[in-house]
Amino acid sequence: MVYELDRNNIPQHIAIIMDGNGRWAAERGKPRSYGHQAGVDAVRRITSECTRLGVKFLTLYTFSTENWNRPATEVAALMGLVLSSLEDEIFMKNNVRFQVIGDIKRLPIEVQEKLQGTMDHTANNSAMTMVVALSYSSRWEITKAMHEIADEVKAGTLLAEDITEDTISKHMVTNFMPDPELLIRTGGEQRISNYLLWQIAYSELYFCDTYWPDFSEDDLHKAIADYQHRQRRFGKTGAQVEQEEKK
Ligand code: IPE
Ligand code: IPE
Ligand code: MG
């Protein structure tokens, strides 16, 4: 199936909840880690296609705060996969900058070092920024932001009455990018699982049943085409939006 995409209306920022690796593996009678491994190939495919389409930020939910509660063997396999799959050459070849958001201090030290190395190495790449959310949850992030803001007020560098929505956005770990226009969740569940709660206030949500390892370029095109057929009203009336589009 070919989906006609309007190249002038590609989301600048796409966020993805990459779900369904475990079930994909189970259907094949394989261990869950086999599904995570296959998920890495999907990450490569989708990153490369997003770069080609002109997406500027791709934020991938890779490991949530809650995922620390999985069996130790699965957590270890996932950490090993982060280490083995971060190949700087692929980022360099695609001119992709690598970034991480999350409570990184909880990760094994060798993983922290590897992440830092890849961030440093790819810092000047400019086609797209791929952001991996690792040991991330939105409530962790919002709580951290509240602590920082409270500290500034206590220190007298910020007046409580000067706190705006912008102040809060600036204290989010996503402060270097715009909010996502489109959030995709694969794997059939229709929930947010503690991802980017502040940032998706007005994002378009797209859910599909495809398990993440099967998510193809075509599936991505379908999601973007769906997004492009929506009218984003931001509280206004449809007629107002149409009027503005004519201008
Ligand atoms: C998503 O796939 C990847 C991670 C959460 C690390 P899952 O591992 O959640 O796969 P399912 O949902 O059990 O199929
Ligand atoms: C969400 O998937 C987190 C990631 C994709 C990293 P989960 O599989 O952990 O979500 P729940 O538990 O089904 O909500
Ligand atoms: Mg899951």
Image (spheres, rainbow, N blue to C red):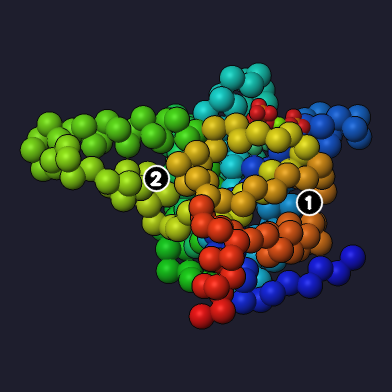
Is residue 215 at all visible to an observer of this figure? yes
Where residue 73 sits in the image (x, y, percent)? 66, 23
Which residue is labeled 2 in the image?
173
For marks 2 and 1, give the CA distance. Answer: 27 Å
Task: Give the mark nearest the N terminus, 2 or 1.
Answer: 2
Which residue is labeled 1 in the image?
215
Label 1 beta carbon within 8 A of ligand 1: no
Q: Quadrant of residue 218?
A: bottom right
Is residue 180 at all visible to an observer of this figure? no
Q: For the residue marked with disc 1, what is the amino acid? A: Phe
Classify the position of the N terminus by image quarter: bottom right
Where residue 161 sits in the image (x, y, percent)? 17, 40
Ligand 1 located in image quadrant: top right
Q: Nearer the viewer, residue 81 or 160?
A: 160
Where residue 102 sits in the image (x, y, percent)? 45, 39
Q: For the residue marked with disc 2, what is the amino acid? A: Val
Instruction: Give the number of callouts.
Output: 2
Q: Nearer the viewer, residue 118 or 2?
A: 2
Q: Nearer the viewer, residue 167 or 39?
A: 167
